Amino acid sequence: MIVALECAMDERRILSVSELNSSIRSLLEGRFPFVSVAGELSNLHKPYSGHCYFTLKDAGAQIKAVLFKLQQRYLERMPKDGDHVVCRGRISVYEPRGDYQLIVDAVDFHGAGALQQAFEQLKRRLAAEGLFDEHLKRSLPRFPTHITLVTSPQGAAVHDFIRIAARRCPMVQIAVYPVTVQGDQAAAEMVQALAEINARVSTDVIVLCRGGGSLEDLWAFNDEALARAIRASGLPVVSAVGHEIDLTIADFAADLRAPTPSAAAELLTPDGEALRREIDRHGSRLQRILRNRIDRIEQRLRLTKHRLETMPHPLDRLLLRLDHLTGRMELALKTTLADQGRRLDQASFALARRNPAHRLQLHDQHLKELHTCLAHAIRLHVQVKQEQFGRAAGVLHAVSPLATLARGYAIVRKNEGRKRIVTEAAQVQTGETVAVTLHHGALVCRVEQASGSEGGIAERDAQSRTASNS
């Protein structure tokens, strides 16, 4: 696209083959600075130079590739025809022949494609959760005094880090928390290390440190639990794993990703020489500022001294003016104090008149009087009600049927149904039982004869008394 644009801008320009190939190389290298390509190895040959040349192909296409001799030391074994691999590197053009090819930096064998797929899936899932969001990143200390390395103490990476950090900033303290950085237990050990450092170690920053290797070698740094432990850390975490082309999940989760352990040491530690030069520069600038200020003050002092020397009796005039101002200030203070005293007396008098204690005393006295009146009214009301009750009780006693029963009379009720009071002989029949209520006690009687005459009634009473006695 860039070449076409340049040609369109100047159609009359004639390119040489070298210029065209150079433009194509620049275009491809800029467009594909780093790629991972999966495929099958074929046509593998290794000339006297030690470089490996081969073709990487799949069912539909192929591309030439080269693995230089220096990069072969990172291989777990030498590749061979028929291997299914994932090659990581960059696209370039070999200008003399006009061939474009893949310059391979690393080769992953037997299942590297599956690992790469698992890496991408985990990366997408954690990114969707927001675990890699930039606003979650913690800021790193500008001048750390203590750095903790989580790494294998036998690796070359830790020695490179310590050497560079000691050279740049000798006063920084570096502690090494030993863990396994490769294998099945590596991720769990690093998670435990992060937890223990946060709980027990007083440090400014934690660095996950490891040298380069294959995808399998660095797989412990693609662990989900490790990524979550990095984000849960209360201290900032720097990921310094592998080479610049190596990417792990820990790199995305960390607060800073350093291309290499050596680069991490340079990023975390200030350059002592540069700091000293900066301090010297600021010191010189401060000295110039102070010198200029002192010069200006000395000049002002000289001018003031000259004015005082030329002023006729300056001290006498100043003393007289001071006495005058002192008298005015004393008079103003006395006037102000007197005014404030009067205002205070007026406020005290007004406050005394509005004192709630006096009003409360009056209300309390009034409440006591109301209480006395209420008690007297209640007693009178009770006395009146008692007298009314006595009169009502007398009237009730006078008309009470109990008094009549006491004089020998009785109340007769039917013994069936609603038990109505019998007032006439016709209300009952011969042989029917009735209930008779006396002044003391009750009787159940059977009617032998019912008559409307007085004799009949007397006879019935006699028979009832005879039945009762029997």
Image (cartoon, grey):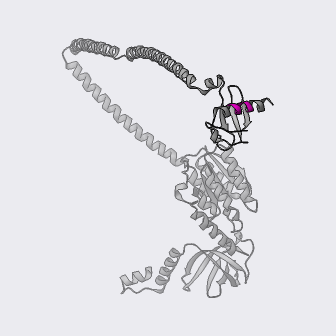
Give whichever of 412, 224 is nearer the camera.
412
Provide the residue span drawn in magenta.
Answer: 458-463
Q: Does the image show residue 246?
A: no
Q: Is residue 369 left or right of residue 454?
A: left
Report the number of discs: 0
Instruction: Please state the horizontal and vertical placement of residue 360, each as a whole percent of the image.
Output: 40, 17
Q: Residue at x 61, y 87 (%)?
A: 61
Give the position of the N terminus as an image quadrant: bottom left
Q: Residue at x 66, y 76 (%)?
A: 86
The answer to if 462 sits in the magenta stretch is yes
Q: Eyeballing the image, is 9 above or below 333? A: below
Q: Eyeballing the image, is 138 above or below 3? A: above
Q: Residue at x 73, y 57 (%)?
A: 188
Q: Quadrant of residue 355?
A: top left
Instruction: Please state the horizontal and vertical placement of residue 71, each as a whole percent of the image.
Output: 67, 71
Q: What predominant SS class does the magenta segment belong to?
A: helix
The answer to if 8 sits in the magenta stretch is no
Give whichever of 167, 450 is nearer the camera.
450
Q: Eyeballing the image, is 387 above or below 462? A: above
Q: Quadrant of residue 264?
A: bottom right
Q: Is residue 31 left or right of residue 450?
A: left
Give whichever of 401, 83 is nearer the camera.
401
